[in-house]
Image: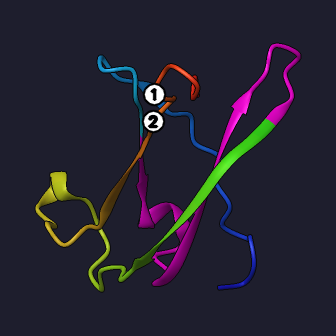
Amino acid sequence: QNGQDDLVWHNATKQDDGSYKVTISASQHKWNSGKYIVHGYIVDVSGKNIGFGATSADVAAPKKIGSASRGNYNVLNKIVYLDAGHGGYDPG
């Protein structure tokens, strides 16, 4: 909704298995339901952002706003895993 007025940049964290993980909360996007589009970028040695992929997920944001740590277990959390590559001809 409303274009990209709720665009948020997230930094993924490298996992022990070499993949990257970031947690994105609907609360950071005005609790909007609908299709969320996620683009992946890497930063090269010169500091330039390079897009490497995109995906989307249909999100039904919860009606009750709050946090799970305060007893609201309806809070929506989606996890996106980014695989850095598979080696060989596909180094990532």
Q: Position of residue 89 (x, y in %)?
A: 58, 25
Residue 53 position (above or below residue 10): below
Q: Position of residue 41 (x, y in %)?
A: 69, 40
**C-beta proximity under 8 Å, tags 1 and 2:** yes
Question: Camera-side residue: 71 or 62?
Answer: 62
Q: Amino acid at mark 1?
A: His
Q: Which residues are magenta?
A: 22-49
Q: Position of residue 83 (x, y in %)?
A: 45, 35
Q: Which disc is residue 3 wearing? A: none
Residue found at the very far front of the displayed protein: 89
Question: Camera-side residue: 13 or 92?
Answer: 92
Residue 44 magenta:
yes
Q: Quadrant of the image for the C terminus?
A: top right
Which residue lies at the image location 43% right of the left edge and 67% below the top edge?
26
Q: Amino acid at mark 2?
A: Asp
Q: Which disc is residue 86 wearing? A: 1
Which residue lies at the image location 53% right of the left edge and 72% below the top edge?
36
Please tell me whether mark 1 or mark 2 is closer to you in this view. Answer: 1
Q: Can you tell which quarter of the image residue 66 is in?
A: bottom left
Question: Camera-side residue: 4 or 91?
Answer: 91
Residue 55 magenta:
no
Q: Which disc is residue 83 wearing? A: 2
Q: Quadrant of the image for the N terminus?
A: bottom right
Residue 80 position (above or below residue 25): above
Label 1 to label 2: alpha-carbon separation: 8 Å
Residue 64 located left or right of residue 91: left
